[in-house]
Image (tube, helix red, strand yellow):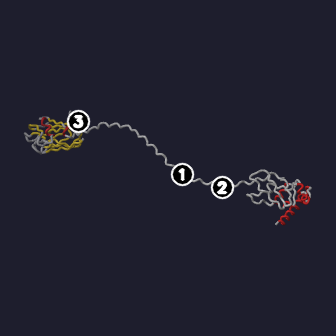
Amino acid sequence: MVLNVRRGLRAFLVLAALRLAPFGCASPEAFQGKLMEAGTAGASAGVGGQAAGGGGGDTTPSGLAGTAGFDAGLSGTAGLGDAGGSGVGGATGGSGGSVAGQGGNIGPDGGTAGMPAGGGGSMGGAGAQGGAGAQGGAGADGSAGQAGAGGAGGSGTTGTGGGAGTSMVNYCDRAHWSETASINAGTAPLAADGDLVTRYTTGRPMMAGDYYQVDFTGTVYLTAVTLNDSQTSPSDYAVKYDLYSSLDGATWAKFASGPGAANSTTISFTKTSMRYVRVQVATPSGNTGLFFSIEEFQVACSL
């Protein structure tokens, strides 16, 4: 392998001599003889020639470094020869340094490499990119938050008490009635006492215009009036009756009429509003001497 290297170098030197001839440079042998004397031969550009990337690997063969030396030594100072054959590649440039790398010791013949003619050494390769940081572990769950304070109790205004309710008076109840009559009025309440044995009576033979009257003491609606004589005086009835109503006890209006009957007489009519009602004999009984009597005065009443 050394033989091949030497052959390559010699061929290279011939080529170099041809390139340097136009500049008045001597033959390769002349350079070989002056190698130790000049001490300026073939500087390697960069650190030991072209620095190869990578950490600590072999650099490009020194023959290529010689090429760089010739390119830089156009000024006639590049010393070549067999020295380049066995030269060890220069050390790899430092990390990012900008100072020119120093030429390595070359050749078994002891020729010292010429001082670097090139500029500063090639900038070292970029440092390896740092690996991605390990992903942090998940944080522990936070402790439960403190329970919120209870809300303040709401204040409320006490409602105003409702007004006293208006009580509904049942004027259809005979307890509120006031009874009277055109004659023998003292017995009028006996026709509204709930007892058929007692009665109102004229105490004399009936006459046209005799009447029995009730004040309900409040407004009511009537649809029928019954004169019940079923117990003690079934024959004391008039041939015909007229019914009158009033709201004030002063002004009266006739609103219904009907014939009398033995035992009980009922006169029906359309619903009529009133406070007072009056039952009046229109036509007396044909039997002379019969009284006008009412055992119970009954009404179909509503409010």
Q: Which mark is residue 85?
A: none
Q: Amino acid at mark 1?
A: Ala
Inter-mark Cα distance, 3 to 2:
113 Å
- Check disc 2 and report the residue beneath it: 131
The local crowd at label 1, few if under 14, some if 14 to 19, many if 20 or more residues have their Cα within 10 Å, is: few
Considering the numbered disc 3 on the image, is that residue within a helix, a strand or a loop? loop
Whether pointer 3 and pointer 1 mark residues with C-beta atoms closer than 8 Å, the reply is no
Tag 2: amino acid = Gly
Question: Left or right: 276 with respect to 127?
Answer: left
Asked if marks 1 and 2 touch (Cβ < 8 Å), the reply is no
- Taking 206 as reference, is 277 left or right? right
Residue at image mark 3: 247
| Residue lying furthest left | 289
| Mark toward the start of the polypeptide (1 vs 2) | 2
Quadrant of the image occupied by residue 14: bottom right
Q: Quadrant of the C terminus?
A: top left
Cα separation between marks 3 and 1: 93 Å
Q: Nearer the viewer, residue 113 or 224?
A: 113
* Residue 253 appears in the picture as rendered: no
Give the camera-side residue of 30 and 75: 30
- Mark in the foreground, 3 or 1: 1
Which kind of residue does numbered mark 3 sit on? Leu
Numbered tag placed on residue 140 in the rendering? 1
Q: Residue at x 22, y 34 (%)?
A: 248
- Given residues 142 and 233, the one toward you in this image is 142
Residue at image coords 29%, 36%: 164
